[in-house]
Image (cartoon, rainbow, N blue to C red):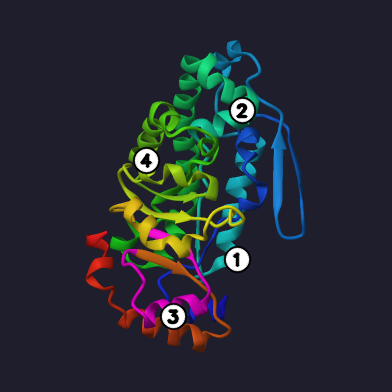
Amino acid sequence: MEDRMAVEDDTLPSVSPNSQYGDYIFGALLGASIDFYGTGVHTWSWTEPVITDWGQLDGLVYDPEREWTRRCLGNLRYGIERAGDRYALGCLLAIEALNLCVMLRGASAAYLDVVDHPDELRRLMAFGVEFIEQFTRLQREVIREHNDAVLDDPEYAAVCPNHSGISLSVDAYDLCHPDVYRRMGREYQADLIERCGWASYHIHGDGRHLISEVATLPKITRMNIQDDMHEVLPRAFAVRADLRRQTGDVPLHVACTREELLEGIANRSLPGGVMYTTSADSVAEANEMMKRVRDYEAPDELAAGAL
């Protein structure tokens, strides 16, 4: 971590101690029994559907005193003890809208509900907004004082994604026509963002058809386009200019190799308004790359305002 702190880049060292629980922790937060499985470096989770009959919806409540909320908040407190002034703490990726419905209803049932039970599905999504807002507030109450001290910049802290914002996705909508997101997704995510301040998004390869839809949401700090469909889609870096046009006023985030970054700087082919994630073998190499990054000016046709 000390080496990482010495890198003069534009990222903020931060940790989300609860990310190892996997997405289905949100079912456990609502009382479901949770199972874990995975590898030495990654954990997945699973819960049985919480809502198997729509008659159960009226009785669905979020109780912060349940075991898994107490565990999550306890992990944040432990993380603060270990962090010192070295890094900030972050909230869990928020699972809401159709993402949450897939977990609470089961994937097949939730996708069929889009057609067969749209009104009930919307009620569940509305519940999800209230639930995620409350859980986010509880997490922030634990980490706020620590993060304010680590960031040491009130103006930046007010918009820092790991502190004042939330992390969102459109994962469940990746398998849907954009119209499903327009009708049964966007309004709930917009409501949650308004309640929670700001949002950053990650979008998987099979969700690229939703980029322009997500870009219309207010208060988005960045959109991370991932490369997990590289067998059938070009890497995000390879089509960076086109993706940058689609994100509009929203900053784009893509991954690349150090060679690609340096070549892009040399031939001035990197669009502005983009965060490029890469690697280096040493702190010295990383900081030398950052000098070249800060000297770089995108050509007029690739400037952020021109795309």
Q: Is residue 121 magenta?
A: no
The Cα–Cα distance between marks 3 and 1, rounded to whole angstroms, is 39 Å
Label 3: few (<14), some (14–19) or many (≥20) C-alpha neighbours in 10 Å? few
User: From what the image shows, is residue 81 above or below residue 278?
Assistant: above
Asked if the magenta segment contains residue 260, the reply would be yes
Foreground disc of the pair 1, 2:
2
Element at badge 1? helix
Query: Which quarter of the picture shows residue 66?
Result: top right
Location of residue 9 with respect to 138 vertically, above or below: below
Residue at the spot of label 3: 263
Mark 4 → mark 2, Cα distance in angstroms: 25 Å
| Residue pointed to by mark 2 | 104
Residue at the image point whose x is 57% and y is 53% from the top: 76
The amino acid type, in three-letter code, at marker 1 is: Arg
Q: Position of residue 231 (x, y in %)?
A: 62, 55
Question: Gap in Å between the C-alphas at discs 3 and 2?
Answer: 46 Å
Q: Nearer the viewer, residue 163 or 64?
A: 163
Give the residues in magenta.
251-273
Badge 4 is on which residue? 213
Who's the residue at 58% across and 57% down the image? 230
Residue kind at label 2, given as amino acid type: Leu
> Which residue is disc 1 drawn over?
82
